[in-house]
Image (tube, rainbow, N blue to C red):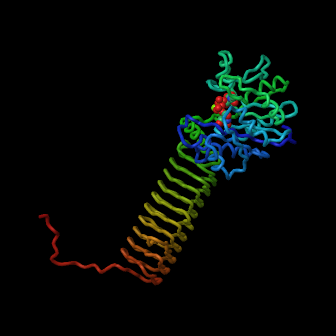
Amino acid sequence: MDKAKDLYIVILAAGKGTRMHSRLPKVLQPLAHLPLLEHVINTALTLSPKKVVVVYGHGGDLVPSRLSHLPVSWVEQKEQLGTGHAVQQAMPEVPLKANVLILYGDVPLTSSSTLTNLVHKLGETCSLAVLTAILDDPSGYGRIIRNSDGEVLYIIEHKDANDEQRAVREINTGILAADSSSMAAWLSSISNNNVQGEYYLTDIIGLAVESKVNVKTSHPESLWEILGVNDKRQLADLERQYQLIQANTLLSLGVTLRDPSRLECRGEIQVGKDVEIDVGVVLEGKVSIADNVYIGPYCHISDALIGEGASIQSHTVIDKANIGPGSIVGPFARIRPETVLVENCHIGNFVEIKKSTVGKGSKINHLSYIGDTEVGDKVNIGAGTITCNYDGANKYKTVIGDGAFIGSDTQLVAPVTIGAGATIGAGSTITKDTAADKLTLSRSKQITIDGWKRPEKK
Ligand code: UD1
Ligand code: MG
């Protein structure tokens, strides 16, 4: 590639996507929780382009407004008159003497290396390079027509092709790279004199050949890289493909996956050594998993740090929380935002923790709600303990000192502080601060009533 030339990337995203049967524009349909177009933009940005220009149209401003956080320029194509017309709309954003790469907003899984290989074809002797592929079933695609020396002559769209042309199995993926000055010149001479009455971008290939340009081609590393999304079936297929890529990445980093086809990664996952992940796990957002972590079946973990040696047992839900090293969480635990389990904590079944810190070695093993609470070190919280943190209008804090023991079925009515080393008798409702190192309980004395009889049915 001509190193002196800047790279500009144009992404075509103006099409309607009728077959999705959705109010959401096609390029905003999610793949692993990110809009299709965002995948394409993210890949484009890995090529360090001078500028990325996105041509939008159908769906109006919804597309640019949803993706306004991305560093791209937006150009509207008011009427969708064809791929050539779409690129024309973007050309004012692309200077002469640059390289321009054309991508589609509904083709989300093209790899950076496939695109880099294509762009590298451009240079002194080549001002147009097309990404092509050989398909068993090429129907619907534009066909690459070559002469007997194997040189590209032109592209014919399926709808415009005769039987002999349709028999060609080499297809146009739609992705191409060109010198921008030549591109601008070719685009100015295309017409819409074809079956679909559209301005075809593909007509520039024939024009390039007429002006004696040597058109080069390259292939994607894998066929799924060029697959586009037109309906929910194809979206589902690409989602599976994407998930398999994520799973393979984790395997290549040494993670043990019980079944690579039963893991969902919808974000950025960092992993340490000797991590084991069982089936049905969903990882979302930024999840960082340290060495020797075990994640059991059917856990849902989003935006979390899982510390070294932690064991997350089956059916646990963790959201925006920090699970300290050596902790055991679950099965069936729910750890909600702003929770920190400092170290070696044990959180058992049907325990919900929200916006709380749990100190080293503390245990909350059964059926509890702990919210807006600071739990010290080595605290034991008995089954069925509830922090009553909300009076219907405001939230209040509970503080539980180091070494405290909270008996089962206790309500701690916040704001309240349990002294260090305090013991709370089972079944208490604690409304006032309790003394350190002493037993406090609030239940009435057990009595037996003589002569009492069970009511009988009349
Ligand atoms: C196009 C190619 C065909 C190739 C195929 C690969 C042309 C003429 N044909 O055909 O050779 O095999 O892709 O999938 O280029 N778009 C706009 N504005 C428009 C028209 C399209 O932004 O006015 C966008 C669409 O949203 C889509 C992309 O361009 O992302 C391709 O358009 P589409 O209509 O799907 O082209 P095909 O007929 O599939
Ligand atoms: Mg198409």
Q: Nearer the viewer, residue 87 or 296?
A: 87
Of the 4 image quadrants, the one containing the C terminus is: bottom left
Q: Position of residue 367 (x, y in %)?
A: 41, 64
Q: Is residue 196 left or right of residue 282?
A: right
Give coordinates of residue 234: x percent, y percent: 57, 35
Q: Residue at x 73, y 40 (%)?
A: 10
Question: Ligand 1 is located in which of the four quadrants?
Answer: top right
State the image coordinates of residue 140 (x, y, percent, origin top left): 62, 25
| Residue at x 77%, y 36% (from the top left corner) | 117
| 21 w.r.t. 133: above or below | below
Q: Nearer the viewer, residue 107 or 408?
A: 107
Q: Is residue 425 above or below residue 196?
A: below
> Quick check: can you spot residue 353?
yes
Asked if residue 121 can be seen in this view, the reply is no
> In terms of image quadrants, where is residue 386?
bottom left
Toward the viewer: 184 or 219?
Answer: 184
Q: Residue furthest front?
A: 78
